[in-house]
Image: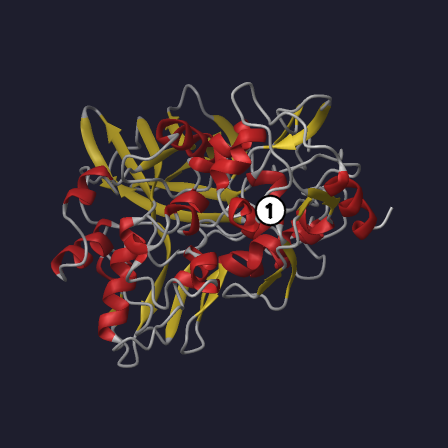
Amino acid sequence: MTRKGLRALTLTLPALAGCGDDAPARGPLTAEERLDPAVCGECHPDHYREWSGSMHAYAGEDPVFRAMNARGQRETAGSLGDFCVRCHAPLAVERGLTKDGLNLDDVPPNLRGVTCIFCHSALRAEGHANNPIVRVDDGVMRGGIADPLPNPAHGSVKSSLHDGASLESSALCGPCHDIVTPGGLHLERTYAEWQASIYASEDPRFRNSCAACHMPGRDAPAADFEGVRLRRVHDHSMAGVDVALTDFPERAAQREKVQRALNGSVLTELCVVEVSGGADIEVYLENVGAGHAFPTGASQDRRVWLELEARAGGETLLSVGRFSPGETVPDPAEAPDLWQFRDVLFDADGRVTHDFWRAVRVESNVLPAPTAALPGEPGYVNTHVPRRYRVLGPTPEVVETHLWITPMGFDVLTDLVRSGDLDAAYLEVMPTFEIESGRLTWTRATAESRISTFSDRPALCVGLNGESRRRTPPDR
C-alpha cells in the first residue's frame, strides 16, 4: 500500500478509545497536538519517558548552551543569529518563535528542544552539517517498523532514515552532530568521524549506525494501545556524555546510562619495562566502544585525561593527572606531561580560545575510531595509541591508572561565569566520570610477560592484550 493509501485508511478508522487507561478518546491528532511530546506520550509512555530525560529534550534548556549562545550573540553583535538554536530548538526557529535563542523562556516548552515530531517527520538531509534536515508535517509518523499498525491518531510509514539497522539512518543524526562555524571551521565532526570509520562500511562484522549504539533495542509494545503486539523498539534516552545540570526528568537514569556507555569505550594496557637506572611505564589506550573519535562532539570543551601513579617502598615515584573535584585541567601546552585528549581552538592571532565564533584553526588530539580491520588495508589507522613515562630509581612495585572525562571543562565554565553569562552554581554540579575500563593496577604478581609494542622489549603487562576488541554490532 502506498503512503497516501495508508494515511487514508488510518484517518478513516473510527475514533477508538485513547491510549492508556486514563487517556481521552481521540481521533486524528491536530497539527498543534503533534508538536507536543506529552501528547505522543499518551500512547508511547516509555519512549516519552526516555526522551524526557534525554539531551534532545534538554537541548533548549541547557544553561551552558544558553550561556555560550548569549555570549556569542553579544560578542558578534548578533551576527551569530540562529547558528546555535537551529539545532538546539529547531521547531522554534522554523515557526519564527526565536531568531537567536535569546528568548527561549518565551517559547513554549514543547518547542524548546529536539522533539518527537522533528525527528519523526524528517524526509531527508540536504547536507552534512548545521541541521539541513527537510521535514514535512503531513500527519504521518516515520519510524523503523516495517508493518506499522493503523491507528486513529496518525499515519505511520517505514523509513530507512529511522531504521537503526540501516546505515542510512545515521544521516538523520549526523547533520546536527557535525557543526561548521560561520567562519568555515569544521568544529564538531562526529558524523564525519563515523563516515570515515569501519562502522560505516557494509562489512557485517563491524557495520553500525548511530542509532544501533545510542538507541539499543528491546522487545516491547511500540504503543500502549489495544491490539499492539511485541515489536523491536528502541531506547529514546540516546545517552552520550552530556547530562542535565538542572532538576530535570530521568536525571539519575540518564547519568547511569552515560556511565554505562563510557565504561567500555576505551580499553587500557599498562606495561612496565625495566631499564638501566629505572623503568619505562608504557600505557596504551584504544578506542573500541565509540563509533567515532573519543571524545567527540564539542571536543574543544570536553576534558579527557589519564591519571597515573607509580609507587615503590611506600614512596611515590611518579604522579600525574590527579585533580581535585572542580579543578581546572590545564591546556596541553601548559602541562606536557599530562596525557589528555581534546581539541584546542586558536583565534586569528594564534591564541588559544574557548570561543568557537573566534576560532579559525583547531588542533585535535583524540583517540581515533578504527578505519580498517587490519594493518595494510587502505586507510588503516592504528588505534592502539601509546604513551611512555620514564621513572628513575627503583622499579615500581605498584602502578595505577584512571581515565577521566568531564563533559564540559571547568575552565570553559569558569570563563562563562566570569563573563556574567553562567551562574557559578553550575560549577558545583558538572560531573566528572571515571571510565571503568581505564582503571588498572599493575603489580609484578598480577602482570604477564609480553613484548612491548612501543619498544619491542620484554615487558610485564596488565590489561588489554594488544589486540583490537572493536565494537561489534549489538542485537538491534
Residue 264 location (% of width, % of height):
50, 33
Residue at the location (69% across, 36% down)? 152
Asked if residue 121 lies left or right of residue 247, the reply is right
- Up the image or down, 366 lies above or below 314; here it is below
Q: Which image quarter is the C terminus in?
A: top right
Looking at the rendered structure, the secondary structure element under dot 1 is helix
Total labels: the figure holds: 1
Q: Residue 217: image x %, image y %?
A: 64, 31
Q: Please give left or right for residue 133 compared with residue 104 in the image.
A: right
Q: Which amino acid does label 1 sit on?
A: Cys
* Any part of residue 279 in sight: yes
The one of 391 and 413 positioned closer to us in this rendering: 413
The location of residue 445, given as percent across then percent down, is: 41, 19
Tell me the residue that label 1 is attached to.
Answer: 210
Residue drawn at x 56%, y 66% as measured from the top left: 132
Percent from the top left, x then y, of residue 94? Answer: 48, 63
How is the structure coloured here? Answer: secondary structure
Describe residue 36's horizontal placement relative to residue 334 as left or right: right
